[in-house]
Image (spheres, rainbow, N blue to C red):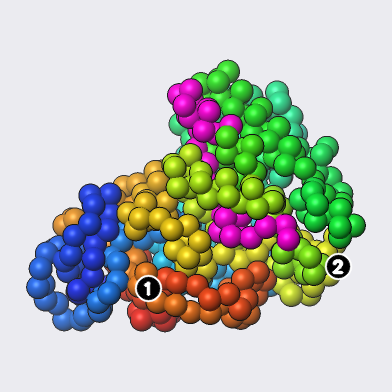
Amino acid sequence: MSDPVEFVIRGGRIVDTDGERSGDVVVSDGRIVAVGPDLRADRVLDAGGCVVAPGFVDLHTHLRQPGKEEAETIETGSRAAALGGFTCVVAMPNTTPAIDSAAVVREVQHLAATALCEVVVSGAITVGRAGEALSPMAEMAQLGVRIFTDDGTGVQDDRLMRRAFEYASGLGVTLAQHCEVTSLSEGTCMHEGEWSARLGLPGQPSEAEELMVMRDIALARLTGGRIHFQHLSSAGSVAMVAAAKAGGLAVTAEATPHHFTLTDAACAGYDPVFKVHPPLRSSGDRDAVREGLRDGTIDAIATDHAPHPIHEKERPFDEAPPGMLGLEYALALAITELNLDVADLVALLSSRPAAIAGVGARHGGPIVEGAPANLVVFDPDATWTIDASGGASRSSNVPYVGRTVRGRVRHTVAGGEAVVIDGNAQR
Ligand code: DOR
């Protein structure tokens, strides 16, 4: 992916794990070759008024390949990622077939070789994500898979999950859980509360998530293993993660832009664009997720970018598939909704998810001479209004249409290549 042309990112405010400073950044042959004042190169990317940060890492992206190319492909999804400032995304394994064997991992890795950002493949915990038998995690780990999840569903069986913890610890890989107890969530399509009662839609209680968070914390304690909680949506879950961390357990968590922005009230018009798993919950839950992001209980912002074709998403609310787009909106929603210091914002989007994904050597690290050139340049003050197009995604299930937000990506440099310049994808 490297670009032979040397270029300089000029006039920005550098924000990374080393702090904040002004300076230019010269990129050549895939690496940062100089950082300092008044640097020159053949080509200039203007960063005036912008933050220059390590490229973002999304722990939770549905790229739909193989099997659902009408919704998204690795090419279109990675273009959306680059436009959103992401230089690395973790591709979820709920594809068709599921990513549950070395053969499928190899196929996705091959398809990802020409993507506009690094695509890290995650593997399923159980064969076919069916929750019955452990997948061949070792053969997938040998190909570099570091995160295993049955995302879209949680592993229901306690004993199987215990064995997954033990197996994963031995391999040095991380388990990520979509926490949802299906005996409480089956047949539901939104959060159980005042709005589900009013709308007459079957609701799932927060406890459907919380019971699995609770069980996995218990299993982390029992096995000494590591667990990453995906897309936390409830105040109770956030409190349990805080307590587990305080107790010294190896627990991490992510939250999505939709769970820190929207509530179940959005479902009032029965528009399936607001249907998602876990569901949008109460304003108290949303506020707890926000606070968890601010106080460090939640380690990372992850998009759960979940494209679905229009003809599927525009079915009645209870029949439509769950999920919404996120890659091109995450930064702006985080800036607009969370009121964070820029350094904290950057950490939630880059260094912390990079560490969880095991890509910290290439992404999220300090912007210094010799480091791999995975960078984002964004204007934190640029305002824009989200439209219904879906951006570069093949799908357009956008729940934020008409919302005016602050913060926009100007340039993205992935693997040394300027893949986005002035807000335009270069291929
Ligand atoms: O809303 C969701 N959509 N939640 C998930 O866990 C899966 C995802 C999808 O794959 O569409």
Separation of disc 2 and disc 1 at Cα?
Answer: 38 Å
Give the foreground label among 2 and 1.
1
- Which residue corresponds to the image point at 61% horizontal and 54% vertical from the top-left? 259
- Which residue corresponds to the image point at 44% horizontal and 42% vertical from the top-left? 295
Magenta region: which residues?
240-265
- Graded by Cα atoms within 10 Å as few (under 14), some (14 to 19) or many (20 or more), the crowding at tag 2 reads few
Which amino acid type is shown beneath numbered disc 1? Asp
- Which residue corresponds to the image point at 51% horizontal and 64% vertical from the top-left? 333
Labelled disc at residue 316? 2
Nearer to the camera, 407 or 131? 407
As for residue 251 lying within the magenta part, the answer is: yes
Q: Where is residue 232 in the image (x, y as percent from the top left)?
A: 60, 45
Mark 2 and 1 residues: CB-CB less than 8 Å, in contact? no
Residue 395 visible in this rendered orientation of the protein: no
Q: Where is residue 127 in the image (x, y as percent from the top left)?
A: 69, 40
Labelled disc at residue 138? none
Q: In this view, does 20 lie above or below 180?
A: below
Residue at the spot of label 1 = 381
Q: Quadrant of residue 156?
A: top right
Q: Position of residue 53 (x, y in %)?
A: 31, 61
Mark 2 CB lies closer than 8 A to ligand 1:
no
